[in-house]
Amino acid sequence: MAIFALKRLGVAILVALTVSLITFSMNYLSGDPAITIAGEGARIEDIENIRKYYGFDRPIMVQYLDWLWNAVHGDLGRSYGLRQPVADVIFQRLPTTMLLGACAITFGLTLAIPLGVLAAVKPNSIFDRAALTLAVIGQAMPTFWFGLTLILVFGVMLRWLPITGQDSWWNFVMPAIALGYNVAPAVMRLTRAGMLEVLASDYIRTARAKGLRPMTVLFKHALRNAVIPVVALAAVQFGFMLGGSIVIETIFQINGLGYLAWESIQRKDLPMMQAIVLILSIIYVVITFLADMLNAFLDPRIRVS
Amino acid sequence: MAETTASRSTLARAGIQTAEEIMAPTPGAMIRRRVFGHVGLMIGSFILVTIIAMAVFANVISPHDAYDQQLARKLIPPIWHDGPKVTWAHPLGTDHLGRDYLTRLYHGAQVSLLIGFSAMIISGLIGTILGVMAGYFGGRVDMFVNFLITTRLSMPVILVALAVVSIVGSSLTVVIWVLGLLIWDRFAVVMRSATQQVRSLEFITAAEALGCSHMRILLTELAPNVMNHLIVVATLEMAHAILLEAALSFLGLGVQPPTPSWGLMISEAKGLMYYDPWLIAIPGLALFMLVLSINLVGDGLRDVTAPENRS
């Protein structure tokens, strides 16, 4: 277990470093970053000053290492637009996005796992068909359009839920649904496939032969093993969700990291954009690392291979 | 049982077919039967062909010019609404600048399909090469490709795409390249495992023993056997690219106005959706139908080409 964990940790750190290198190189995507910051019609002296001020005149490798060193110490630079340290703003907004992500993944899992179990218990039944149809429809629905449609139906026509803002729990209902339904199809398919496999195994037959109640067999014996791969998938999906929340947060005007990203993209605030990409990537790396550890703990076969 | 097999092989060696073999449908007929018997595949192909036809013949079938603004005729509701302005001249109504909505819908199909297809080709090339190399050579190559896939997955697609487009500047070509360079991960994952499976089969070993070059084995032995996986991922990734383009255009950093794109149409109508909900319903539904049809075709092709995988 320890060797497995160490190897996996090494990969995680290497991935994080590569991501940081890619994020850093966004500086040079447009050619000369100093010209970008100076804007159109800037004088040559101004550009020179900006180049000196932000240190773009140093060798690229030095700039990268310097940037990385500061980032590791919690200094992600200063925002061009807000004139504040980037890290402060990000950690102020991050909890909102995490909360939204948590609500969304909870919604997605509570929708998908029971449906997947139901579909596996009665394969090719009407439940199975309905669940699969739902999955196909869910996969084809554009997130932003689904969000707008929710606003129109539940916010404007029925007036059940507040449309924008984040003052109460009710504000998070529609965004969580709009963000969370996306994970449901994949989780449902995986749960269904896992349950079908487990239900056909010998130990389930033994449990049934012992005369255990069907519900006990289903939930205590079968589901426990069938959801192991779902843990890894849910972690991956949670990471994707944090990235995808930019669309949902702009629609519902939730003041989280996604909205911040959108604002800084509008302002061409490069340090902020880089920091958000870096933070979200690192969160993803950490979450998937933890999920892999949990998986190895739950399923000893993974540790061995 | 053993006796029948033996006698059958004797017959086969003599070039004589048994009655069963003569009566059995040919492989082609079996494929055709599966294709036409697959409801999802049939529905999906029908919708997809309709949308492709809309895109290809957009200039011929459009009742108006996609860029022609007539503010006097703005915001005419579609024909299923009542009202003094409703007219058959604009079956789906007009937008806030008086442009015919049906015409823009036809031209939007062009943009979606063009971006989806091109981005899919680019990502398909990258992902397939990486995945096949990893699956075929294994070892260090496999480790390296796996590392690339993990790194790619850890970076949020929409965010990186938005950031890059905002720095480089938005155009159709930029959107295609950015999406193509970002979404190759699923190609790599699927092609890697498909290649690994085929790699261990006897006919590959036989080809190696005959002294075939790697190139020849990859092209003539391996490629035909992983093709079905490739086609399925290609359809799913095309749908993915179309959804991403729509999201980028919706956020204002994809296709730029006045080019008609379904995502952009929804974005432009966002402010008016409380009064005229059909403005976002029509392009949204079109987007949904296109992605749904591509996914149905992809799922259908998987079922048809690999019947043993059907549950």
Image (cartoon, rainbow, N blue to C red):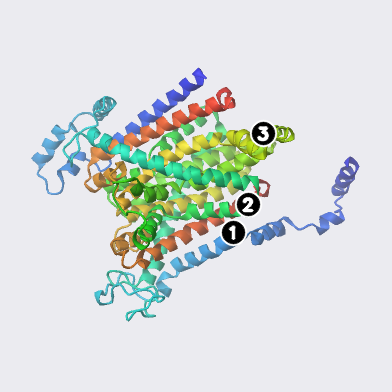
Q: CA distance from mark 3 to mark 1?
A: 38 Å
**Which amino acid type is marked by label 1?**
Gly
Q: Are marks 3 and 1 in contact (CB under 8 Å)?
A: no
Which of marks 1 and 3 precedes in the sequence?
1
Residue B209 appears in which quarter of the rendering?
Answer: top right
On what subunit does the disc labeled 3 rest?
B
Residue A39 appears at what percent x and percent y?
Answer: 16, 46
**Which amino acid type is marked by label 3?**
Thr
For label 2, the residue is B303
**Residue B55 image label:** none
**Residue B205 image label:** 3
Q: Are marks 3 and 2 in contact (CB under 8 Å)?
A: no
In this rendered view, identify the residue nearer to me: A281 or B201.
A281
Helix, strand or loop under label 3:
helix
| Residue A174 sits above or below residue A33 on the image | below
| Residue A8 sits above or below residue A103 on the image | above
Quick one: label 1, few (<14), some, or many (20+) residues within 10 Å?
some
Residue B301 appears at what percent x and percent y?
Answer: 60, 54
> Residue sitting at 62 percent across and 40 percent down?
A195
Horizontally, is B17 left or right of A147 in the view? right
Q: CA distance from mark 3 to mark 2?
A: 29 Å
Horizontally, is A146 left or right of A304 in the view? left
In this rendered view, identify the residue nearer to me: B292 or B120.
B292
Point out the frontmost of discs 3 and 2.
2
